[in-house]
Amino acid sequence: MTVTVPSKINVHLSVGPVRDDGYHELTTIFQALSLTDSVTVSAAETPSLHVTGEGSKIVPRDERNLAWRAVDVLAEHTGRSAEELGSVSITLDKGIPVAGGMAGGSADAAGALLALATLWKLDLSREELTSLAAQLGSDVPFALHGGTALGTGRGEELVPVLSRHTFHWVLAFAQRGLSTPRVYRELDRLREVGDPPPVGDHAPLVEAMAWGDPHRLAELLGNDLQAAAVSLRPNLRRTLRAGVEAGALAGIVSGSGPTCAFLCADGDAAVQVSARLSGAGVCRTVRVASGPVPGARVVDPDDGGDDSPWHPSPPQAHA
Ligand SMILES: C[C@](O)(CO)[C@H](O)COP(=O)(O)OP(=O)(O)OC[C@H]1O[C@@H](n2ccc(N)nc2=O)[C@H](O)[C@@H]1O
Ligand SMILES: Nc1ncnc2c1ncn2[C@@H]1O[C@H](COP(=O)(O)OP(=O)(O)OP(=O)(O)O)[C@@H](O)[C@H]1O
């Protein structure tokens, strides 16, 4: 049973004050990108977790792995032990950079939830899966959902956003990842000592999405965590500049960083920008991706299509 799951970028990320539970109140527009992880689960004699692909060496193989935790969360929800449901072997094939601000671990958690629910033939509603996803992390519901969506609360409350057009992105992966809690703490510190200008209202960006005009969208990209990520990794400034010099319309730090995402005019421009950026020596690796794409889906080995019992909403759904 294999599920593919998209990465995400936050084309708009407005971070509010810290709440009593330690999370920050967010208003964000997520977009799911074609850079994916795949999660394969199968019945096994003893539980195991294997990781291959991008950054696999540094991914934990134990209960710290979000895909592993998905097994326990799902078992607890059904009221049965993981042993009663049957031991599983999980394989993660990573395309999404680890600790790169593109929700790689969250993608694996969402993929594992959907794959296990399908393997164990659990008849779960979309609402149930989404609520289990939120227990695993703030970004996990969006990895199930996919497309383009407005996220509020700590990022887990989602409303689909109209986005009929495909946008083309170039992604610059950094040498080392950044810790999400550390970046949020750095933003709190910057706000105590100064006043990093906050991103504006998300309404104009939602409109630009609906129009499908990358030039308009480029002017409106904004991320409150960017100042914090750049403060922790000042050389991200160089990467952001290099992407625009290479021909991108605009660049932004993705989520908590350090991956930088560059919006391009079209697919051909993205290929050109990626080639130029690769030669600029400002990042470890460059990838081209497009979005929006659907959320987690079961891969049918016969036709590569979707035979999932749970069908996420299509990316062009609207609020
Ligand atoms: C930066 C983003 O990727 C933007 O979508 C997310 O906010 C991060 O989502 P995530 O990695 O799924 O985060 P979680 O696993 O839920 O939380 C990890 C840590 O990030 C911080 N965190 C996360 C979400 C949020 N709204 N406020 C926070 O302050 C908290 O320190 C939290 O302990
Ligand atoms: N399946 C997983 N894949 C990658 N990292 C994982 C996984 N499960 C747990 N982790 C741990 O989570 C940390 C953050 O990894 P992840 O790739 O999810 O970061 P991220 O993409 O920056 O997250 P986000 O964008 O949601 O804030 C890693 O350093 C790793 O120790």
Image: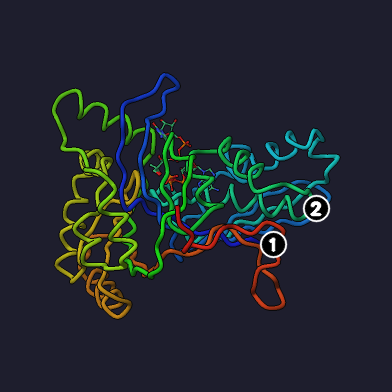
Question: Secondary structure under badge 1?
Answer: loop
Q: Amino acid at mark 1?
A: Ser
Position of residue 53 in the picture relative to residue 229 (left or right): right
Of the 4 image quadrants, the one containing the N terminus is bottom right
Tell me if the residue at label 2 has its CB under 8 Å from ligand 2.
no
Instruction: Indicate the colouring scheme.
Output: rainbow
Q: Is residue 86 above or below residue 190?
A: below
Q: Quadrant for ligand 1? A: top left
Residue at 52%, 52% in the rendered image? 143
Q: Amino acid at mark 2?
A: Lys
Question: Secondary structure under badge 2?
Answer: loop
Numbered tag placed on residue 171 in the rendering: none
**Please, which residue is most extreme toward the bottom here?**
268
Q: Position of residue 222 (x, y in %)?
A: 24, 49
- Judging by the rendered image, the residue that carries numbered circle 2 is 121
Residue at 29%, 57% in the rendered image? 207
Instruction: Give the number of marks.
Output: 2
Say whether marks 1 and 2 touch (CB < 8 Å).
Answer: no
Q: Position of residue 198 (x, y in %)?
A: 20, 38
Residue at 64%, 59% in the rendered image? 311
Q: Position of residue 154 (x, y in %)?
A: 43, 34
Position of residue 273 in the picture relative to residue 143 (left or right): left
Front residue of 145/260: it is 145
- Judging by the rendered image, the residue that carries numbered circle 1 is 308
Label 1 to label 2: alpha-carbon separation: 11 Å
Q: Is residue 157 above or below residue 91?
A: above
**Please, which residue is most extreme toward the top here?**
20
Q: Residues within 10 Å of mark 2 (few under 14, many from 20)?
A: few
Position of residue 184 in the picture relative to residue 307 (left or right): left
Task: Quadrant for residue 289, please give it.
Answer: bottom left
The answer to which of marks 1 and 2 sits earlier in the sequence is 2
